Image (tube, rainbow, N blue to C red):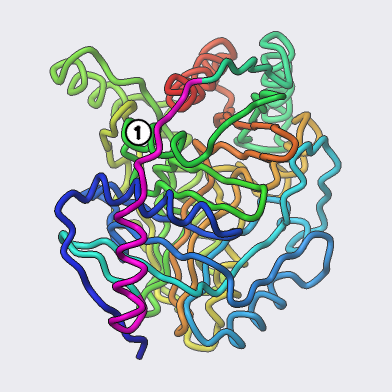
Amino acid sequence: MQEFTSFPVKDPALFKKQVLQWASSFQVFQCFDSNKNPYFQDKFEFALAVDAISEIKLYQEERQFDLLQEFQTKSNSIIFGYLSYDLKNQIENLESNNVDELNFPSLYFFQARYFIELKDGKCHINRPSLEAIYIFEQIISQKSPEFAPNHLEWQSRISKEAYMEKIASIQARIKEGDVYEVNLCREIYAKNADLDPIPAFIKINEKAQAPFSALLKLNQNYVLSFSPERFMRLKANKMLSQPIKGTKAKGANQADNENLKLSLLQDEKERAENVMIVDLVRNDFARSAVPGSVKVDELFGIYEFENIIQMISSISAIKKPEIAAIDALKSAFPMGSMTGAPKIKAMEIIEELELSKRAVYSGALGYIEEDGSFDFSVLIRSLMYDADKQFLSLHVGGAITIDSVPEKEWEETELKAKSILQYL
């Protein structure tokens, strides 16, 4: 059992800023912040894993899930990292040949030297007393990073007209019976983006208040995620997935928001999209689950976040004892809400119609514990940044069905982009 030393924290908001500034001097770290969200908070209120004792960083290698299993077993401790969307190619006979100006690893996990958790007004550091005191004093001596706005020239990889044409193409395939739903995304990017990721993350996180906010630094590569969506959790052999389908911008006041919630709940198109993904997740879970254990705990849950209102469903199942945890993760990857139904056909169409490689976007970020328990968010509402190239990328998208109105689908991508970019 690892030793922890605890310290009282007078100002948790200030401490978060200081500990991230302290971590910025290391080549690798990963931060989680639930923002005390009452809906989805689980293991960590706020946690930071810093400096890699060991790591697995893969690009084109085969058997990446097997290699991850070997690394997790060898580490014999909690590991932190992400799975990119393009690992789909190692699960099914698929390809990813579109433009990728970031070139992040397709899979990255590390075992951390330092682990710092902020919970119930106390900081817990995985070090004996004297070393922990030294680290804590280093942290609280840090100057709080200040965000300096920069002029970013954002470009869309695809025009509005071309995006709507692709929606029409998907709807034609739906009519032909090839597919029922496809999640179509587009990339918005900025070149020559001189961004300081630490204060940028702090500023957006303070505004977005997402339940799965996370910041990952991997050398010059950064992921700034403000995700509201859980991909999959495994805890005591119980699997849980919480897909999102259905989004509305919040109103001017709470009375407006209550009306918007009711409108979203009663929206037949949004309900149809949501139930398709629920069925897809149920099928994914069935591969690893004890027969008869897959169930829908909540259908069409309406949840209010800082900027938007979302329709979220919850699906659970009991994992078969003989199925390894990472195999259960693999069997459900990538998240159905980011693909469509049927899943393989939807991913083929995504590769054909989208203009840029998703890579880390719509993959999963989280941790795997020593006993195989894990929790992963879906990497949406997330900025990817290469500090050396000064290239900043954001993907946005939505589910296309036969009832989709192309103009409204474009507006939904604009809303999702604005929920992040307005703060930069």
- Position of residue 80 relative to residue 415, above or below, is below
| Quadrant including the N terminus | bottom left
**Residue 252 in the image: x percent, y percent?**
22, 12
Task: Look at the image and tell me whether residue 370 can be seen.
Answer: yes
Residue 4, quarter of picture: bottom left
Residue occupying image coordinates x 36% and y 68%: 135
Residue occupying image coordinates x 46% and y 27%: 420
Task: Look at the image and tell me whether residue 313 can be seen.
Answer: no
* Residue 65 relative to residue 271: left or right: right
SS label for mark 1: helix
Does 128 lie within the magenta span? yes
Residue tagged by mark 1? 208
Q: Please state the extent of the stretch shown in magenta in the rendering.
A: 126-149
Q: Amino acid at mark 1?
A: Ala
Nearest the viewer among 75 and 256 is 75
Does 129 lie within the magenta span? yes
Is the residue marked by circle 1 packed among few (<14), some (14-19), or many (20+) residues within 10 Å? many
Residue occupying image coordinates x 68% and y 17%: 155
